[in-house]
Image (tube, rainbow, N blue to C red):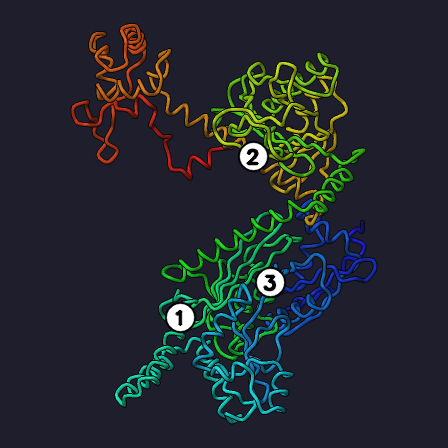
Amino acid sequence: MADPSSYRPRPGEIPDSPGVYRFRDEHRRVIYVGKAKSLRQRLANYFQDLANLHPRTRTMVTTAASVEWTVVSTEVEALQLEYSWIKEYDPRFNVKYRDDKSYPYLAVTMNEEFPRVQVMRGQKKKGVRYFGPYGHAWAIRDTVDLLLRVFPVRTCSAGVFKNAARTGRPCLLGYIDKCSAPCVERISPEDHRELADEFCDFMAGRTGTYLRRLERQMGEAAEDMEYERAARLRDDIGALKKAMEKSAVVLADATDADLIAVAEDELEAAVQIFHVRGGRVRGQRGWVTDKVEEITTGALVEHALQQLYGEESGDAVPKEVLVPALPDPVEPVQQWLTDRRGSGVSLRIPQRGDKKALMETVQRNAQQALVLHKTKRASDLTTRSRALEEIAEALDLDSAPLRIECYDISHLQGDDVVASMVVFEDGLARKSEYRRFQIKGFRGQDDVRSMHEVITRRFRRYLAEKERTGEWADGVDGTETGGDPRPVDGGDPRPAAEPYAAEPGADGRALTDGPALKDDDGRPKRFAYPPQLVVVDGGQPQVAAAQRALDELGIDDIAVCGLAKRLEEVWVPREDDPVVLPRTSEGLYLLQRVRDEAHRFAITYQRTKRAKRFRAGPLDDVPGLGETRKQALIKHFGSVKKLRSATIDQICEVPGIGRKTAETVAVALAGAAPAAPAVNTATGEIMDDEEGAPETTADALGESVSAGTPDERRGQER
């Protein structure tokens, strides 16, 4: 690890002008390329106290061994040079978008004597007009098949074309009038090129001219009683309209624009681009990148623009580019796009109307692409193995942690304090063994104390079961410990068909994995194995509390770490400094996924408990009174207030309510405090029972809600 002060330029060496800089490692490899309006100010940010740098920036400057720069005249030149150097050196710490697949384009080879329509991938060639990209090659072929009725342009390869010219016989498409057969000179090179130009114009969105021309020709043919020709023109019009329907109008003003959306988390980002030409979506593509440097959304957009238009020119750069965030500064990027197009380009954030609605669609696609990428990454066996090995190496474990348990605390301003335990085995979620706990040792908000209680309860039961059976198995009973014995959100009592069961339902029954995971009395084991690693959601205090709980129980063979959410630092017990894993580390990605799953599970349970508390009513405390009879009572009397004032004989009139139950209901309601008066929230008026807004089923059955907006409530949750 290099000391940045060893290669820091001397004062006054760095010019105060625009430029591009390169950091090199000890082997002279370029590891980072950046641009700056002022090289002196930008580079000074890298040579400050390492404690003040973001972990990703800190890793870069300690990996580097030297820095050099090149002065340019303008920020636009800096942008161009930065793009060139990133393409040339492929630096490891720069954002590099990678295509999630090779996208096919509809290409027209206008650089040939007889232009050809074909599907083309890879590097774009000079003199070829491209349309797309498309999601699938078959979508291009379907479109071309429809358009060849009207624009019978050559589609055959060079070999087929030469063979047809040699024999004097066209291919099948020439016989069925889907090719004008320039190979046998049915059409002159000039006319065929004009046909190709019309094909390109139609694909570029100038469709109205050709439709109107065909409709006029069809009308003239009908007037001249050339009905067969009129029918053929009618079919041509239908083919063109069908081809147009394949890309619906999304912008009514026939705009040419590219819409770029970004979905990101702490480690990765996904970019989706919709290409709109003539108001229609003509193509779509997407990229994914690892965020190996500290970067804003605007900077991600800037890098996407560089990759998208770095080798484009002319009409390939649209007049309008819509983005979710503007680069800072935006003027050089906008000028660079203008230079590449040769005319003005508008780079802006859509604020309202159809463009904003379409941008939301692109954003959803980007979010889905990120989720899909993470799912594929998590399911890869090789990747999971590497992640476990990286965790073992970073935490100095004897072996890879095949079973990881993660704990998180959740509450709403100190109320309904709960904890979650999620289990990952071999890098995959073991949802049948998720557990949840209610904090019972104290009241109020104290995450550290709550973490100590949960770890103590979980492993105390583990030790008791181990002592009873002499095996490494745990028959924890969630009722005795205060934990909820139900896995996840309930479950299915049938044995799981696969080692990693899907998330169960909400019926409250426990999942089992067959007889091997059952106690002698047939009950499912609560914890089949001890973990090799305990992860807590939090920093030093939470880690210390978890380690203290294990020390008090005499457990010294289970590793503990914590993942702090702010900087994604990994904390270990009795260490003053965190373990910083590389941002591209699969181990960090796995720890983050485990932590996020524990948080999701905890907050779901906390919200469920809160909802049950809000729904609680006076009839809930009546023993033996089920949901059906509660509904019957409320339906009969209309409100709890009227039910409270009813006599036992009147309560007995309700179908299904006997005298003993009626007496129990009357006693329960007599001892319960009356509900607060109903208030009309629009006027502030207190309404009595006769005005139609008294205690009703909302009071009895708990249909009340928390105060505040949903956003306000989420902001108070932990």
Query: Which mark is drawn over residue 599?
Result: 2
Numbered mark located on residue 303 in the image: 3
- As helix, strand or loop, the secondary structure at mark 2 comes to helix
Taking the image as shown, residue 85 lies to the left or right of residue 615, namely right
Q: Are marks 2 and 1 in contact (CB under 8 Å)?
A: no
Picture residue at 64% right of the left edge, 28% below the top: 542
The quarter of the picture where residue 103 lies is: bottom right
- Image position of 605 (left or right of 638): right
Q: Residues within 10 Å of mark 2 (few under 14, many from 20)?
A: many
Mark 3 and mark 1: span between their CA atoms?
A: 37 Å
Q: Residues within 10 Å of mark 3 (few under 14, many from 20)?
A: some
Q: Nearer the viewer, residue 257 or 114?
A: 114
Across and down, in percent, residue 373 comes to: 60, 51
> What residue lies at 66% left-to-right and 66% top-to-bottom?
16
Q: Which residue is mark 1?
A: 242
- Label 3: state its secondary structure: helix
Mark positioned earlier in the residue sequence (3 or 2): 3
Instruction: Specify whether 209 is left or right of 506.
Output: left
Q: Give the residue type at disc 1.
A: Lys
Q: CA distance from mark 3 to mark 2?
A: 32 Å
Discs 3, 2 touching: Cβ within 8 Å? no
Where 498 falls versus 691 (above or below)?
Answer: below
Which is more foreground, mark 2 or mark 1? Answer: 1
First along the sequence among labels 3 and 1: 1
Is 115 above or below relative to 35?
A: below
The extreme right residue here reads 27
- Give, as a three-letter code, the residue at label 2: His
Residue visible at 60% across and 47% down in the picture: 375
Instruction: State the residue in front, 688 or 539.
Output: 688
Query: Which residue type does callout 3 highlight?
Result: His
